Image (cartoon, rainbow, N blue to C red):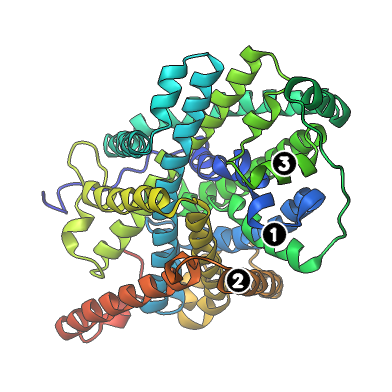
Amino acid sequence: MDSNSSTLNRSLGLVGLTATGVCSMIGASIYVVPFMIQRNVPGIGPYVLPAFLFASIPAIFAALAYSMLASAMPRAGGSYLYASRSLHPFWGFVASFSQWFGLSIVIGVIAYVVVPFFRDVAYALDWTMLANWLDQGLVRVVLALVLLWFFIGINILGLSFYERTLIPLMLLMFVLGFVVIVAGLSYSQGEYLTALATQGGRQVDLIEIPFNWTTFLSASAILFSSYIGFDSIAQAGGEAKNPVRNLPRAIGLAITVVGFFYISFTYAVYHTVPWQFVAEEAQSKDLTAAGLLSLLLPSGIGIAILLGAAIALLNDLPAMILSVSRLVFAWAEDGIFPKNLAAIHPKYQTPVPAILLSGTVSSIGILGSHFAGDFFLGIDIMVTSMLVNFIFMCLSVAWLPKRNPTLATQILIFPNPILRAIIVGIGLIFLLSFLGIHTYKDLNSSVDGWYFHSTRIWLLVMGMASLLFFFRWKKLKEADPSLLEKFSKLP
């Protein structure tokens, strides 16, 4: 396939771009993480919602940085393009490869996590044989791979097919999520405790725990992962209609809508389910919002909530696959990766080789989740990866006027340099703090092997990726001594 036989098609409008961001954000991050965090960060107890709110602060400043850069450089590859034209091609590669690796792994984690939701639907329908079959390890891995490659196929078939799949699923996800919010607000913790005692013979000790800053900040660093996804909008910059206007708007809309949904959803579930019960159950099993509320709900509503959770998780896949594949495309366009990875399908106008490579790495994420026995390892890798990425985005905003003043004049969001400096400064303080807290917690955690420390895995992968970059960069520089000049311009 000739890489010049076609080009990316600018057909994604504001709705499609916003849906890409929203669907990259809502999924495991709302149906699973706010409850399983009771196991990952013991002692967070009743402070999950405040930690969720606190985690939104660095996400908002990172979103502002992305919006500024997107208005100036509306091209495919988002973070790679921004940092390579603002700082240096190597730092652009580090920022974007970190993002690509973290998100590719998490795509696999999501595909792996969604299968138990279908198992729970089968149990709720009394299809016991099917449920037991879905609970087998090999079956779970195979079905996760099938789901992943189904959505890879949707991405390959083009943006119109992608939008027709994504937007209806997003609307259905919000409708079923609204059911969770109404259900959670309709009952009290007293009713839940009564149901536990009468239906399961369970008693819950309603202990109180003091607030602890170390625990709170550790939880906030992980919950920060729930806001990751708006960056996928920037990666689609080469396929956006009126990108200078629509990219920043879509980023703002996505983080606003999702933030409001997160807070409402988490508050509703904890309004009914005592955190003490969630913390106790999380130690021995994987919890979901649907599973926690099912004790009080009629079976039909419980099944609808389970399906809503499954749809929310599935929604992550096509949007995130689009995001990571466009990074590979941008590297290949610049020659950092082999040029054939930038090939565009002449009919579908999608970067098929880039999609296939990203899908292969995501498949490794499925296998890793299975053999590690805890999907939180993948979440931890993503948190490290994206904190690094967002730090580089803030640095890119700060450095762009010095490295590339021509492109800096194209920033339409917050044109005042003093206001930009304030946004960047606050963003860097929060992001660096979160990275330090998350790294400290990871390196001091008790695990069975060094490879269960997400920081060490990230450093190993980034070290190998850096060697690849310098190998390719040396060859490019030998062929073109004025190479850096090329990287001061947009592709």
Res 81 → quadrant = bottom left
Q: Residue 278 shows which numbered tag?
A: 3
What's the CA distance linking mark 2 and mark 1?
11 Å
Is 335 situated left or right of 56 in this image? left
* N-term mark: 3 or 1: 1
Residue drawn at (42%, 18%), measured in percent from left and top? 129
Q: Residue 435 shows which numbered tag?
A: 2
Viewer-side label of 3, 2? 3
Residue drawn at (49%, 58%), measured in percent from left and top? 377
Residue 18, given in percent of the width and then of the height, sits at: 54, 41
Indicate the amino acid at tag 1: Ser
Is 282 situated left or right of 465 in this image? right
Residue 11, given in percent of the width and then of the height, sits at: 38, 38
Indicate the amino acid at tag 3: Val
Res 79 → quadrant = bottom left
| Residue on which the image places disc 1 | 220
Q: Secondary structure at mark 1?
A: helix
* N-term mark: 3 or 2: 3
Q: Can residue 201 be seen here?
A: yes
